[in-house]
Image (cartoon, rainbow, N blue to C red):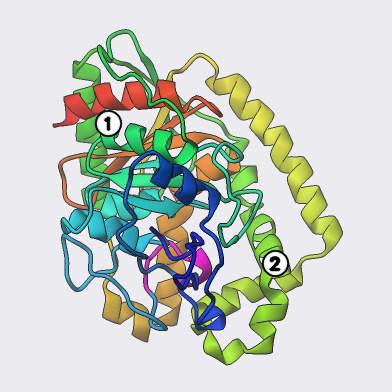
Amino acid sequence: WKDLFDSAGIATESGSALLKDRVPDADCEVLRNATAMGTVCLGKTHMSEFAFSGLGYNPMTATPPCVNDADAVPGGSSSGAGTSVAFGLSAIGIGSDTGGSVRIPSAWNDLVGLKTTSGRVSLSGVVPLCLKFDTIGPLGRTVEDAALMLAALEGGQAADLRGASLKGKRLGLLQTVALDDMRDAPRAAFDAAVDRLAKAGAEVEPIAVPELTDAMALSGVLYTAEAYGLWRDVIEANPDLMYEQIRDRFRVGATFSGPDYVAAWAKLRVVRAVWQERTAGFDAILCPTAPNLPPNMERLLSDGEYYVTENLLTLRNTRIGNLMGLCALTLPTGTPSCGISLMGAPNREEALLRLGAAAEAALT
């Protein structure tokens, strides 16, 4: 379990020295549910500090290695949750996803990762980053494992994946933003994966949502204003205890006003309505999970500009799902550290998992 899920009597520090020796009195709701359903919590996993980076690099605690490149970061912020599964230490990992933090470590470590719809899975007892975007989801080896773990988190019934097929399914190939500045390996892996889905019977059609560009531009105010609003007093009481890249990203939130934040949410709701209208006829929207491969750890430490640009690029495609309020599933393509994402309508996780099971069969 990622180090932001409260566990009774066990330190839960959100990867930060600012919360050192924080020991909750009770388990968070999803841990209680999962335990009641028969799962066993093996331990707490490393993460990006306060979950505010997609790279998984944390010099303040520890950085797990990427399963495909020991010199590269593993993806974050649910870094240890992903690598614990990829290295065979656990059956499944539990992470959070505010802008891609389940899907990036899943993609870079060749796993299945499920981002749930905001508001579906309880956040009670979970250390927050941005409450309006925070979600909880599993990182596992198969779609079936992800479906079973979602049911355990909710104390409910797992999606029925029997008979799942791609035949006749309409998949939209997102043209806006998601294919820009793609690195060669992720692009080739994505194209090959889309081709396999089509050969398995899916109808793949290009789709453009130009308004999405406007939504992406709102990310700065929407994320940093809320994150800094939640953590300003804690951070500024001991700012030197934070990794400077994470601290500086939080502090960007101070540059926005209350009216800026309210106006950004009003604009985002308009774009969400447009997205829902344009994508209504599709079973899922496809995009590369990440447009880049895991960056080199040493260069991230020595080159501040590289850290910022790679982090923003890493989270760009996954953030689409968070901004649009969707559920999303990343699957391995068969090319190391390259994933393909299927984005579904809000609260349609069961349908997305069925589609994912069929896609998984076509990709393996």
| Label 2 with label 1: CB-CB less than 8 Å | no
Q: Quadrant of residue 76?
A: bottom left
Q: What span is colored magenta in the figure? A: 49-57
On whether residue 51 falls in the magenta region, the answer is: yes
Is residue 183 among the parts visible in the rendering? no
Residue 275 lies, in percent from the top left, at 60, 28
Label 1 packing within 10 angstroms: few (<14), some (14-19), many (20+): some
Residue 148 vs residue 208: left or right? left
Q: Residue furthest right?
A: 259
User: x, y percentage for residue 29?
Assistant: 54, 48
Residue 202 % position (x, y): 29, 15
Residue type (three-letter) at the residue carrying disc 2: Leu
Q: Which residue is mark 1?
A: 144
Write down the residue under mark 2. 230
Give the mark, 2 or 1, whose residue is nearer the N terminus.
1
Task: Kindly report which numbered mark, 2 or 1, lies closer to the viewer in this rendering.
Answer: 1
Image quarter hosting the C terminus: top left
Image position, residue 93 (x, y; %) = 32, 52
Q: Quadrant of residue 77?
A: bottom left
Task: Give the residue at x 62% y 20%.
Answer: 277
**How many numbered tags mark residues here?**
2
**x 41%, y 61%: residue:** 2
Q: Is residue 278 above or below residue 319?
A: above
Secondary structure, mark 1, is: helix
The correct choice, above or below, for 61 with respect to 263 in the image is below
Determine which of the numbered discs, if any, sits on residue 212 in the image: none
SS type, badge 2: helix
